[in-house]
Amino acid sequence: MTDESVPEQDETQNPEIESLIGLARQKSQAGRNSIFETVQDLFLQKKDGLSERERTLMSDILRQLIHQVEISVRKDVATRLAKRNDAPKELVLVLANDEIEVAHSLLVNSMVLHDADLIELVRHRAQAHQLAIAMRQSLSEEVSQSLADTGDIGVITKLIENEDAKISESLLDYLVAQSKTVDSFQNPLISRRDLPPTWRAGCTGGSRRRCARSFLSAIRSALLILTTQWKVLCWMRCMRLATPRRRKARAWIRRRRSTNRRNTG
């Protein structure tokens, strides 16, 4: 990573931040990782003993250096922050928008991420981030709706499978209707505690109709095969019956020819 990748210093930036970022302006990736890990350890382990100014300083350092360190370091930080309700919001958001290997633990567990944050992530991140959000222990109706709005069958199936996710009645109604053509929705919907019993038939009705059509199609195919086999058997029988007759006819012709030759001789 080159020196140019380090953020430019702002004239109004805190001198202590400038000093620490200056230390990060070294060619050694290991050096940057070490600086970052030292700062994040100080921030996370001694946060209660820091003043508001010092907490802000540590948060700014972590946020500005986060993309200057290796993915394994970012993943470790994200995993630790996911367990803390006092994690710095800006840093959590940066890591939640990172590669899924880094972001996963935050997307699934972090309570610092509120509904508005999650909805923005659903709208602007790819399927992997959406799937992780669909796995959260508690999802509001608004976040569930945003996941359904993606139209991604895998994401919606994961949402339905999450029994802790709150799904509005109107969305449930839509999903039941969709389950008539999307098989992967059916079993998770039937298993949901919040699905009215009268709607369960709607989840299985389409499946029963498809099974009936498949059954009838299988019967037609079997009948076609049996009919073909019957025709072949009939033809073979006719051939077996016809063979003795042909033999008698040929024998009769030979006898006639023999008789004719004797008479002319």
Image (cartoon, rainbow, N blue to C red):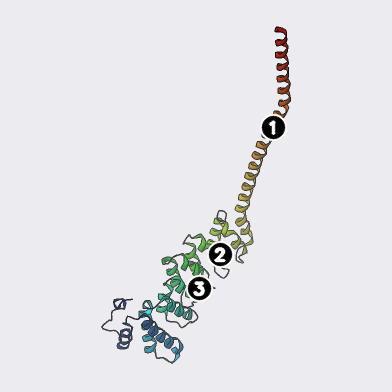
What is the spatial separation of the Cα atoms under label 1 and label 2, in whole angstroms? 59 Å
Viewer-proximal residue, 163 or 251? 251
The residue pinned by badge 3 equals 108
Mark 2 surroundings: few (<14), some (14-19) or many (≥20) residues within 10 A: many
Q: Is residue 186 above or below residue 84?
A: above
The residue pinned by badge 2 equals 160
Q: Which of marks 1 and 3 is in front?
A: 1
Mark 3 surroundings: few (<14), some (14-19) or many (≥20) residues within 10 A: many
Which quadrant does the N terminus fall into? Answer: bottom left
What is the spatial separation of the Cα atoms under label 1 and label 3, in whole angstroms? 69 Å
Residue farthest to the bottom?
A: 49
The quadrant where residue 180 appears: bottom right
Percent x, y for residue 95? 42, 75
Viewer-proximal residue, 197 or 20? 20
Percent x, y for residue 179? 56, 56
Identify the residue shown where x is 63% and y is 52%.
208
Viewer-proximal residue, 256 or 163? 256
Percent x, y for residue 143? 48, 68
Q: Which mark is residue 236?
A: 1
The amino acid type, in three-letter code, at marker 1 is: Met
User: Which callout, 1 or 2, points at the residue further toward the start of the chain?
Assistant: 2
Residue farthest to the left?
A: 11
The amino acid type, in three-letter code, at marker 2 is: Ile
Q: Is mark 1 on a helix, strand or loop?
A: helix
Q: Which of marks 1 and 2 is in front?
A: 1
What is the spatial separation of the Cα atoms under label 2 and label 3, in whole angstroms? 16 Å
